[in-house]
C-alpha cells in the first residue's frame, strides 16, 4: 500500500483524472484542513475511513492526521509517450520542454514539477523513473502538481533530445560556463536540459545541445539549486513569449 500525506498532494490527486485509482482517505484527526479534504472526498466519491492515530502512523509515517491510499507505486503523474507528444504538437509553435538528466533528489524533482506547473511547461522528460518509492515526497514537494504536469519516461535521453530537434526544438543545456540566458531568443520550440545535482549534464547529452546557457548571478558559490535554476529558466522563456 502507498499513501500520500501532504494536504496539497491529497487534494490534487483527488481532483485529477486518476481519482478513480485512489482511496480510501484515512483520517485520524479532524482539523480544519482535514475536514475540507473529507468534504472534497465526498464530491469525488472517495471513501473516507476513520482510524486511530497509532494505526495511521504505522501505515503512513509523517502524516498530518490524514492520508490518502493510492494504488500505483509510481508518482501520481500523467505519463505520456514522447512519440505521442511530438505527434500531437500540430501547430504548437511555442512548446516548452524540460529534460532532466539524473535528478536523483525527490525533493528537487517535486520542486521542479511545481515550477513546470507555474510556468506552463508542456512536458518533462526524464530517464526511466528511479524514484517510485519516493512518490509521497515528490507529490508533497510539488504541492500536488505531480498530478497535472505531463511527463515522459525514456531509457535514452540522447535519443529523446534528437527526436525533439527533428521536431523543430532548440536544445539549451544549463551550464555555468554557458552564455547568459537572457541574451538568447527563447521563443519557438525550446527544450532546457538540466543535469544532476552533482555530475551535471552527461557528455553525450551535452553534445546534443545547440547551446549552453547560464543564469547570471552575484553569489559566492558557482550555481543555483537545480529546482531554482529550472524556475528561472522557465520564467525567462515565458517572459520572452509575452
Image (cartoon, helix red, strand yellow):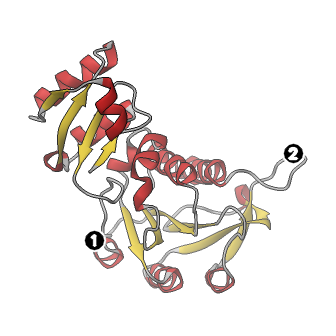
* Residue drawn 58% across the image and 54% down it: 237
Mark linked to residue 174: none
Mark linked to residue 88: 1
> Residue 141, how many percent across, how many down?
49, 42
Where is residue 211, by image quadrant? bottom right
Q: Nearer the viewer, residue 178 or 74?
A: 74
Q: Nearer the viewer, residue 203 or 117?
A: 203
* Residue drawn 59% across the image and 61% down it: 186
Where is residue 60, by image quadrant? top left
In this picture, residue 200 sits left or right of residue 217: left
Residue 66 visible here = no
> Residue 174, how many percent across, how many down?
69, 65
- Dot 1: what SS? loop
* Residue drawn 51% across the image and 79% down it: 157
In this picture, residue 186 sits left or right of residue 58: right
> Residue 178, how many percent across, how many down?
78, 68
* Residue drawn 48% across the image and 86% down it: 159
> Residue 191, how many percent across, how many down?
53, 68
- Dot 2: what SS? loop
Mark 1 crowd level (few <14, some 14–19, many ≥20, 10 Å Cα): few
Residue farthest to the right, as pictured: 220
Residue 123 visible here = yes
Q: CA distance from mark 1 to mark 2?
A: 42 Å
In this picture, residue 68 sits left or right of residue 62: left
Q: Which residue is mark 2?
A: 219
Mark 2 crowd level (few <14, some 14–19, many ≥20, 10 Å Cα): few
Amino acid at each position: 500500500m502507498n499513501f500520500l500525506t501532504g494536504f496539497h498532494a491529497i487534494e490534487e490527486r483527488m481532483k485529477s483524472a486518476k481519482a478513480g485509482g485512489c482511496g480510501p482517505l484515512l483520517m485520524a484527526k479532524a482539523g480544519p484542513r482535514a475536514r475540507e479534504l473529507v468534504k472534497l472526498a465526498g464530491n469525488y466519491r472517495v471513501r473516507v475511513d476513520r482510524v486511530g492515530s497509532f494505526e495511521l502512523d504505522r501505515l503512513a509515517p509523517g502524516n498530518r492526521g490524514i492520508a490518502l491510499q493510492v494504488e500505483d507505486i509510481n508518482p501520481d503523474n500523467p505519463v505520456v509517450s514522447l512519440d505521442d507528444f511530438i505527434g500531437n504538437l500540430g501547430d504548437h509553435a511555442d512548446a516548452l520542454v524540460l529534460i532532466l538528466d539524473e535528478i536523483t533528489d525527490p525533493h528537487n524533482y517535486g520542486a521542479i514539477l511545481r515550477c513546470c506547473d507555474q510556468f506552463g511547461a508542456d512536458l518533462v522528460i526524464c530517464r526511466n523513473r528511479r524514484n517510485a518509492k519516493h512518490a509521497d515526497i515528490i507529490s508533497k514537494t510539488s504541492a500536488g502538481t505531480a498530478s497535472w504536469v505531463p511527463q515522459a519516461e525514456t531509457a535514452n535521453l540522447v535519443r529523446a533530445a534528437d527526436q525533439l530537434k527533428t521536431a523543430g526544438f532548440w536544445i539549451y543545456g544549463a551550464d555555468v560556463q554557458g552564455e547568459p540566458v537572457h541574451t538568447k531568443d527563447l521563443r519557438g520550440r525550446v527544450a532546457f536540459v538540466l543535469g544532476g545535482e552533482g555530475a551535471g549534464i552527461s557528455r553525450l547529452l551535452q553534445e546534443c545541445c545547440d547551446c549552453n546557457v547560464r543564469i547570471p548571478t552575484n553569489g559566492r558559490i558557482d550555481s543555483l539549486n537545480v529546482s531554482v535554476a529550472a524556475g528561472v529558466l522557465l520564467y525567462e522563456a515565458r517572459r520572452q513569449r509575452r
